[in-house]
Amino acid sequence: MYNKNILILALVAIMSWTAWLVVLFKLSPNNHTELALLFFFLSLFFALFASFTIILFLIRYFFIKDDLSNRILNVSVRQGLLLSFLSIFILIFQLLRVLNWWTGILTIVLIAFLEYYFSYNESKLL
């Protein structure tokens, strides 16, 4: 079951990275500022999400060596999503010129607290 999901995520990653490269090289931010930025961040978000999820799943799958592959995939999807949001937020802060060391650390701490909250609630259910 998880092999099909990983294959779909791999296809999404390939298509998203391709879309991101097309946006990067074909859209000029001088001509279509809002549209170029929207496509840039959306394609980068999906590319990072799929890539982080696959990488985290493979790391867990090879180190845990357990038959809880669906649970491992669920955790990897959640953490891939949070890491993608973190990356996009950091880039948006840099674009707005409000990124400095304490806003970056505050953003990382916020994402870490969200992950702690989700993992704590998940462990209470088990």
Image (cartoon, helix red, strand yellow):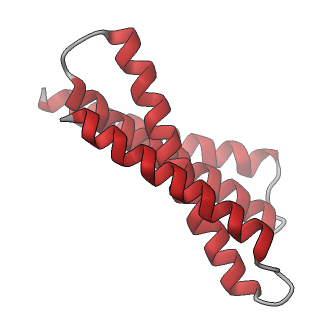
Task: Give left or right: position of 31 versus 126.
Answer: right
Q: Is residue 57 placed above or below 24 in the rendered structure? A: above
Q: Name the quarter where the N terminus is drawn.
A: top left
Identify the residue at image location x=45%, y=20%.
59
Residue 35 in the image: state x and y as whole percent: 67, 85
Identify the residue at image location x=35%, y=18%.
61
Identify the residue at image location x=70%, y=76%.
37
Residue 23: quarter of image:
bottom right
Identify the residue at image location x=62%, y=49%.
107
Residue 62 in the image: state x and y as whole percent: 39, 13
Of 64 and 101, the residue lying toward us: 64
Residue 40 in the image: state x and y as whole percent: 67, 69
Of 49 and 114, the residue lying toward us: 49
Residue 25: quarter of image:
bottom right
Of 13 and 112, the residue lying toward us: 13
Task: Give left or right: position of 19 versus 56.
Answer: right
Q: Is residue 116 placed above or below 42 in the rendered structure? A: above
